[in-house]
Amino acid sequence: MPPLIDIIPHGERVEGHRPWPRLIVTADEWRHVAREIAAGRATLFGLWGDSGAVPTVHMAIIADTTGEIVVISLACPARKFPSVGALHPPAIRLERAIHSLYGLTPVGAPDVRPWLDLGFWDVQHPLGVRQPAPAEPPAYAFLPVEGESLHQIPVGPVHAGIIEPGHFRFTAGGETVARLEQRLGYVHKGIESLMTGATIEQAARLAARTSGDSTVAYGIAFAQAVEAALAIEAPPRAKYLRALMAELERLANHFGDIGAICNDASFALMHAHCSILREQVLRAADACFGHRLMMDRVVPGGVADDLRPGGLTLLRNTLQHIRARFPRLVELYDNTASLQDRTVATGVVTAELARQFGAAGYVGRASGRDFDTRRTPGYAPYDQLDFAVPVLTAGDVNARVWIRIREVEQSLKMIDRILAHLPDGPIASALDGGNGGNGEGLGLAEGFRGDVLAWVRLKDLHVARCHLRDPSWSQWPLLEIAVEGNIVADFPLCNKSFNCSYSGHDL
Amino acid sequence: MRRTLLESLTSRPLTEPPPATDDAALAELAASVERAARRRLGRSLAIRQVDAGSCNGCELEIHALNNAFYDLERFGLRFVASPRHADVLLVTGPVTRNMRQALERTYNATPDPKWVVAVGHCAADGGIFAGSYAVAGGVGAVVPVDLHIAGCPPTPLQLLQGLLALLAGASEDDRRLSRGGS
């Protein structure tokens, strides 16, 4: 991939946007960048709308190899913008959401159906110029089906287990899935609307509740965005404690997922044992930081509380126990032929699709995409932690399990290093930079399922606008493709191997 | 696999014993489960969980109820796949407008007698999401609620205590334990 400087037009640079540049571009320049992304010379990293004096659309792009990021902004006084999705399918849903929420039209978009708006709100375009919603919302036009011996299986929104809601419309020929079409948005809470005008503290609490299983990652991404906007830094001890929390969150989720994936192949023994490890991690997190999921423990400026000494003892014991137990569970997974028969060659995502969609986290890394924001672009203290990023190429359920296994091993190493090198000092910096509480910032964090992006505009220490981009936006569409050609009974296995966020996606 | 299974037979179980000798509350609740559950509905309650818009934090802690430490099923409480099999709806989240209809249909599909437990701060009154264009209100704004379990999210122990308290309340024929009601 060429450096971004070769691709990005020489737009007018926005003052006070940190740490990466934001450029105001023209419609032609916007189209040029869309073509470059479609040609694979950069990765689409985010695409969101903005109201304000003039409605605007923003696009974040990243160079995978260097981690260089640029945000470009196009003003849309006529409430329309050139569709990126017309050239680059990964942008399609993002643009549908922009239209549903902001009323900005992507011109030339191949799919103009609403996304996130299911016709149940009182208003249309709630984040743009609000219109009253029609009394009878039009029926959603699911993709048409033609062919003999095909039947449809609608699943959800309420799903059979203890799980978030969404709609999956399967078209099957016998047992084989011919197509899966998702319809999401059921847990859309209007978070970005609630953020507008909020204090930083209130906005941080909202960010922490965007996707509960990634509350630490969201906390870090939001905190980094605010700190960038205010041109301040969290103290070193806080950065180390944030990383400790982030790796504990990763461990807890990976243990839960590995067990749950096996459970979806009816192998309950792995699920029972992995659940024990997950519970032990949560109890250690509670002992260290006062909350099992560590919600509200990361705050803009630093962390809310210091590591509790009693917690440290339990944490060390827990790590020792995990090191004793986990390898045997991995061996169990690897040696059970009937389980391998279910996970190997099931739910394949090709390397090309992973690259095209900028597939986040373990979904990308299991399909050859060597990308981890802790390393590239990277953020403190990971530059001091010497860790490996596992990458596999098979792209099946089994590969997504193995990436998690390897990441567990890396997280254990990282936690050892964090504890060995934890600096002394304050745990939070004051939220006053030299710019009067104003500024724009972009923050990133590598959550357990992938990169969380937070973009914030501050005015007088209040949030004027905040956009949160969940890694699942680059993963949900790939699930539709991964399940094609597999039997319906393998869907839970595929779905759990992705473990996309509904709440993080729906916002 | 054989070794792992054999170990489970010979090693101490992780399940935390009810009643623990130094946890009087759990002892009292454990005994009352048996009386209450048996009196009302034989020996068990079937629970259908519904996420009506949560951030998924509550779901994680509800999942924990099934792990070896909390082992929900030993109390006769278990999760079922269909509302038609359920005695209790365990509802999380502020009810989003997008989930309102699904929650109502799930409630209507659950045969009587049934109870609704609203889990978490959001389920009580919309919590931090109250006032959004996308949120209808707490669970009580959509279906009648018998019990609220507070927390963000409630811990598995708080969930367990709430579910057992529900049974105690149900056995006394008092269906409106919460301040919310219908």
Image (spheres, coloured by chain):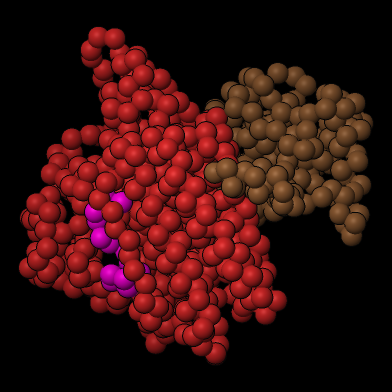
Could you say where residue A195 lies in the image, as x and y percent from the top left?
47, 59
Looking at the image, the residue that sits furthest to the top is A148
Figure quadrant of residue A171: top left
Q: Residue at x 32, y 61 (%)?
A: A390
Depth check: A394 or A504 in front?
A394
Does the image show residue A48? no
Q: In the image shown, does B64 or A131 lie closer to the viewer? A: B64
Q: Is residue A377 magenta?
A: yes
Q: Quadrant of residue B114?
A: top right
Residue at screen point 29% across, 9% down = A149
The prevailing secondary structure element of the residues shown in magenta is loop
Residue A170 at least partly seen: yes
Q: Tell me the shade of chain B.
A: brown
Which residue is drawn at the image coordinates 87% and 43% (left, top)? B30
**Chain that is red in the image:** A
Q: Residues in magenta?
A: A366-378
* Vertical arrangement, residue A109 with respect to residue A200, above or below: above
Image-based side of B43 in relation to A418, left or right: right
Q: Nearer the viewer, residue B160 or A321?
A: A321
**Where in the figure is residue A11, as x and y percent of width and height?**
13, 68
Quarter holding the N terminus of chain A is bottom left
Percent across and percent down for residue B176 are 83, 34
| Left or right relative to A316: residue B77 | right
Q: Is residue A457 magenta?
A: no
Query: Which sits in the foreground, A319 or B75?
Result: A319
Classify residue A316 as left or right of residue A332.
right
| Residue A220 lies in quadrant | bottom left
Q: Position of residue A413 (x, y in %)?
A: 46, 72
